[in-house]
Image (cartoon, helix red, strand yellow):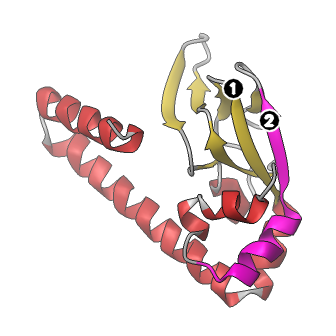
Amino acid sequence: MDDLPALLRSAPIFAELDDAVVRRLAERCVPRTVGTGFTLFRRGDPCAGTYFVLEGRVRVYRTSPDGREQTLTVESSGRPVAELPLFDGDPYPASAVTTAPSRLIFLPRAEFEHAFRTDPEVAAAVVRALGRRMRRLVELIETVAFKDVAARLAMLLADYAEREGV
């Protein structure tokens, strides 16, 4: 991966950071290229870090005791995967597998914690990203609680189309 800082900047959480900050973060990241069906982590694994999807897709899912799988999200270009355990220290709450050949950036947990503690610009970017994520969750709760099935399906399809650029 030729220009890791530019690739890292493609993730919305880092898009507004100063170039020097992005370069420092890029030095701490590990680029990975994997094929379809590669398991990034399983539910219950200790959090080693987080991934950012540069190209490809990652399906995040949970498995019920009887073996049924429920997809929680499918992340694509520029999106983080499993950032929650970076903050609470708990294991990964779900499993993640690539559904297409993918180029990823892996940010180890220790490196993230160091950047968060020592760089106010990184901390502010993370807080903004968490705020956006919380806002989406509140909207999701409202949708599930107050919308009928047809309206929920229409919103889901519109969101998917927007994320995929359709």
Q: Residue 120 at what x, y percent from top left?
A: 68, 89
Report if residue 68 is visible in the image. yes
Left or right of residue 118, residue 80 in this image? left
Left or right of residue 125, residue 150 in this image? left
Residue 137 lies in quadrant:
bottom left
* Spatial separation of the CA atoms under disc 1 and disc 2: 8 Å
| 23 magenta-colored | yes
Q: Residue 149 at what x, y percent from top left?
A: 16, 27
Left or right of residue 44, residue 143 in this image? left
* Amino acid under disc 2: Thr
* Amino acid under disc 1: Pro
Mark identifier at residue 101? 1
Q: Which residues are magenta?
A: 17-34
Which residue is at the front of the view, 83 or 38?
38
Q: Residue at 63% of width from left, 64% of height from top?
A: 9
Q: Residue furthest front?
A: 2
Q: Are marks 1 and 2 in contact (CB under 8 Å)?
A: yes
Which of the image's four quarters has the C terminus?
A: top left
Callout 2: 10 Å neighbours few (<14), some, many (20+)? some
Callout 1: 10 Å neighbours few (<14), some, many (20+)? some
Task: Provide the residue designation for mark 2.
Answer: 33
Q: Residue at 51% of width from left, 34% of height from top?
A: 74
Q: Residue at 13% of width from left, 27% of height from top?
A: 150
